Image (tube, grey):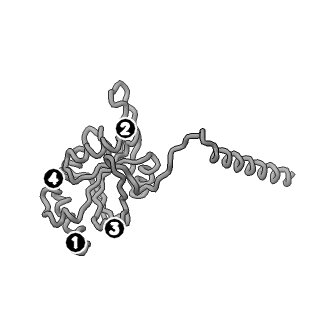
Amino acid sequence: MKYQWLILALALIAGLFTRYMMDSNDPNITREPYYPMNFLESGTQVIDLFDPEDKRIRLVYFGFTQCPDVCPTSLAVLAAALKAIPQQQQDKLWPIFISLDPDRDTADKSAQYAAYFNPSITGATGTAQQIKALADRYGVLYIKNELENSEIKYVIDHNSYFYFLKPTGELIKKLPHMASPFQLIATIPIITSTISN
């Protein structure tokens, strides 16, 4: 009896492996390509979120373009903070808006939305797998919430933080959503001072 289960298990594994090999070589099977989570699209460009050659601190906000309140408020706060700090500090920052709604937010739409608040903010998106990987890495919680009798059909409920990241992607600090830019204005000089001139 023990050997029968062993034979069945081996047969199942062999069958699954054969199916995988056949599917891998079948050109008619469409599959979404996998890209590392750090290669996102913005407008017509591909950006490397963790490019080691770019020494700027990443100041990242996750949201979506059809967000009715929290996202535009947060990006307005970010834009106000960027406008208030000296150019020397701005040069050490790379502000990035990453969409949690890749089904609707194209690379162009994400870029245009972010630039509306401040031209220096990069708006980016990626595949659903990339966005989930980034969200998981930084503890971004989000869920699709269907809306009945609404033209926008659904919203993305999510927590709201500003994430300061090293060029390698390592988290330095995160700040919660705020109604005014003062906390960001106070934090940016402290974070950017870690970068050598």
Q: How far is mark 1 from mark 2, CA to CA?
A: 37 Å
For marks 3 and 1 on the same chain, the one whose residue lies earlier in the sequence: 3
Residues at marks 2 and 4, CA–CA distance in whole angstroms: 27 Å
Name the one closer to the observer, 65 or 48. Answer: 48
Contact (Cβ within 8 Å) of mark 2 with mark 4: no
Q: Is residue 53 left or right of residue 9?
A: left
Going from the N terminus, do you reach mark 2 or mark 4 first?
Answer: 4
Residue sitting at x 51%, y 44%: 32
Callout 1, which amino acid? Ser
Helix, strand or loop under label 4:
helix
CA–CA distance in space, label 4 to label 3: 28 Å
Residue 35 is situated, as x and y percent measured from the top left of the image, at 47, 53
Residue highlighted by disc 4: 80
Closer mark to the observer between disc 2 and disc 4: 2
Residue at label 1? 193
The residue nearer to you, when weighing 64 against 173, is 64
Q: Secondary structure at mark 2?
A: loop
Q: CA distance from mark 2 to mark 3?
A: 31 Å
Residue under label 2, please give it. Answer: 104
Query: For the residue marked with disc 4, what is the amino acid?
Result: Ala
Query: Spatial distance from mark 3 to mark 1, Cα to Cα?
Result: 18 Å
Residue drawn at 40 percent across, 53 percent down: 135
Q: In the image, is residue 166 above or below residue 13?
A: below
Which numbered disc, 4 or 3, marks the residue that appears first in the sequence?
3
Type of amino acid under label 2: Arg
Closest to the camera, between mark 4 and mark 3, is 3
Q: Which residue is mark 3?
A: 53
Q: Give the mark nearest the N terminus, 4 or 1.
A: 4
